[in-house]
Amino acid sequence: MLGRFQYNDIIFSGEVFDGIVYPDPVYQQLDDEYPLSSLLILPPALPSKIVCVGLNYADHAKELNMELPKNPILFLKPPSAVLAHEGLIRYPAESEQVDYEAELGIVIGKKCRHVSADSAFDYILGFTCFNDVTARDLQRADGQWTRAKSFDTFAPVGPFIVTPEELGRQNLSPGRLSVSCRVIRGQNEEVRQSSSTSEFIFGIPNLIAFISSVMTLEKGDIIATGTPPGVGALLVGDTVEIEIEGVGVLRNTVVSAE
Ligand code: MG
């Protein structure tokens, strides 16, 4: 697994195995290894943009009684919204309904444009957990999605990036991963979303082909692949966990904005 970390004032990338972080050797001032617990976990990528897919689960389309889209519906979240594992989601004063959306995140490994579906995996660094946090009332009020999707802290991502090879070693395929969301409220822990990427309307290769036919994808860009059924509201004080099979658990707590 790949990640970004902070030790004192030093920010670095490295690999994680069994709770030990091995910094990239370019960071000569660092030791060869650190216990993960001694480091601050940062967002695992620094995207120039986050490209999100609006409706991409057949079971979610059914839940909403919507026809399947002919093309992926795309929108963007800004890099300023990125939040690390264990970071605090700030509930904006302007909103009265902030929702979670559990999503598989794809992290782009190298700059690309006009990628064919057949070669899409050449451009994937790996997979991560993503929470497409959304101020649903503002999304409805505005008629377009930028404000609702773009508040600072509305793009929790991580904790790490799992490469396609690492998934393969676990006998897992990115097109057949369970995706779930749990909300912990006081003593109560509830599974709110539970589906599989096998419900994708547009598979990973087709998404990369479609998005890269529109825009250049840069190394570190994140594609958020849409959310399954069961989307719902978060309250201040909730802890929300996005779990993706073989990829990890992304945990964040909601606080009120000052
Ligand atoms: Mg979404």
Image (spheres, rainbow, N blue to C red):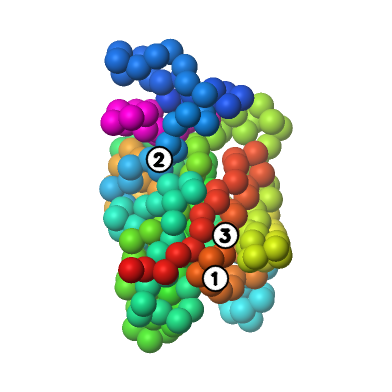
Viewer-closest of 249 and 70? 249
Q: Name the N-terminal-most of marks 1 and 2.
A: 2
Q: Is residue 172 above or below residue 95?
A: above
Residue at image position (48%, 46%) is 85
Mark 3–mark 2 contact, CB under 8 Å? no
Say which amino acid is labelled 3.
Answer: Thr
Q: Residue furthest bottom?
A: 141
SS category of the residue bearing label 3: strand
**CA–CA distance between discs 1 and 2?**
23 Å
Say which amino acid is labelled 1.
Answer: Leu
Viewer-closest of 213 and 95? 95
**CA–CA distance between discs 3 and 2?**
18 Å
Magenta-colored stretch includes residue 233:
no
Say which amino acid is labelled 2.
Answer: Leu
Name the residue carrying label 2. Answer: 42
Residue at image position (68%, 37%) is 172
Mark 1–mark 2 contact, CB under 8 Å? no
Q: Position of residue 110 (x, y in %)?
A: 35, 35
Asked if disc 3 is less than 8 Å from ligand 1, the answer is: no
Q: Nearer the viewer, mark 3 or mark 2?
A: 3
Residue at image position (52%, 31%) is 37
SS category of the residue bearing label 2: strand
Q: Name the N-terminal-most of marks 3 and 2.
A: 2
Magenta segment:
1-13
Determine which of the numbered discs, if any, sits on residue 239 in the image.
3
Determine which of the numbered discs, if any, sits on residue 234 in the image.
1
Magenta-colored stretch includes residue 4:
yes
Q: Is residue 36 visible?
A: yes
Quadrant into which the C terminus falls: bottom left
Q: Residues within 10 Å of mark 3 (few under 14, many from 20)?
A: many
